[in-house]
Image (cartoon, rainbow, N blue to C red):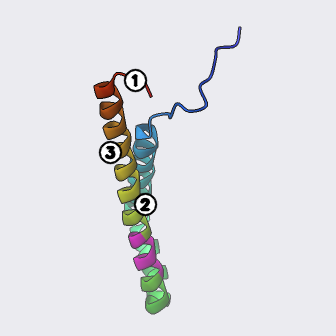
Amino acid sequence: MARDLDPFKLSSPRIFLVRMLVFLTLCLLLCVVLYKQIWTAFLANPGLNALILSVLIIGVIVGTQYAVIVVGLIALATIAAFAVGTRL
């Protein structure tokens, strides 16, 4: 039997936040392992590579902020729905 799916029920975004953190941790570990090769390549064109690195860092920060905000909004919506006696 197929179970009934509610198209209006949202899945928890926490799993996506956890996946983001795992991915960033793996990337950081890879950068630590390949530090010498990355530094040599960075010095080949420091201006362009600094621009690319700064855009990457800003993107990671903004993306993480949005994910945290969504998790907070889902939590607030759940609390509000519980207060009025409905389910999300």
- How many other residues sit within 10 Å of disc 3, few (<14), some (14-19) or many (≥20)? some
Query: Which amino acid type is shown beneath numbered disc 3?
Result: Gly
Mark nearest the camera among 1 and 2 is 1
Mark nearest the camera among 2 and 3 is 3
Residue at image coords 49%, 33%? 11
Q: Which residue is mark 3?
A: 72
Mark 2 or mark 3: whose residue is earlier in sequence: 2
Which of the two residues, 65 or 58, is positioned nearer the viewer here?
Answer: 65
Q: Which residue is mark 1?
A: 86
Question: Which numbered disc covers residue 7?
Answer: none
In the image, farthest residue toward the right: 1
The Cα–Cα distance between marks 1 and 3, rounded to whole angstroms, is 19 Å
Mark 1 or mark 3: whose residue is earlier in sequence: 3
In the image, farthest residue toward the top: 1
Q: What x and y, as percent, mark residue 54?
A: 40, 78
Q: Which residue is mark 2?
A: 63
Q: In the rendered view, would you say 11 is above or below 59?
A: above
Label pair 1/2, CB-CB below 8 angstroms = no
Asked which secondary structure carries label 1, the reply is loop
Mark 1 or mark 2: whose residue is earlier in sequence: 2
Residue at image coords 32%, 45%? 72
Magenta residues, as a range? 52-58
Q: Toward which corner of the image does residue 14 lie, by quadrant?
A: top left
Left or right of 52: which side holds 71?
Answer: left
